[in-house]
Image (spheres, rainbow, N blue to C red):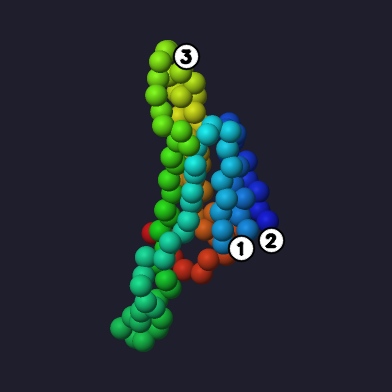
Amino acid sequence: MLNKIDIPGTTITLEIVDKNITITNKIEYDMQMHFRNADADTSLDTSGDVFEPLYWLDIKATPKVPTEYHSSLGVKAEKRNLAELQKFFEFIENNKRNLFDLCGIKGELQ
């Protein structure tokens, strides 16, 4: 099942296919996002019930080319890119649980 999400106010799009999240953008950043299992093993609570696995969101954005500035115009362009990145991170922070559920992962989110 394919879920496509356009991040409002940005050129950034998320595509979720079978627990994998692909991020595309027009701001020349390599962006990756994964829900990672925080538990090495399945664990049992004191009554012998299995705990739900615990996940955390690993997300990073790296410029595709090293950033170097030679004028205020270059800084202004990067400022627009950073504004998009900020909107992206705010969207993810506000919708992390929904994205986790869309991925169909069974467990708890940290």
> Between marks 1 and 3, how big is the CA–CA gap?
41 Å
Q: Secondary structure at mark 3?
A: helix
Which residue appears farthest toward the bottom when viewing the image?
Answer: 48
Mark number, residue 18: 1
Q: Which residue is mark 3?
A: 73
Number of callouts in the render? Answer: 3
Q: Residues within 10 Å of mark 3 (few under 14, many from 20)?
A: few
Identified at 42% across, 71% down, the residue is: 53
Amino acid type at circle 1 is Asp
Mark sitting earlier along the chain (2/1): 2
Amino acid type at circle 3 is Leu
Foreground residue among 93 and 68: 68
Identified at 36% across, 70% down, the residue is: 39
Q: Which residue is mark 2?
A: 1
Mark sitting earlier along the chain (3/2): 2
Q: Secondary structure at mark 1?
A: loop
Q: Quadrant of the N terminus?
A: bottom right
CB of mark 2 within 8 Å of CB of mark 1? yes
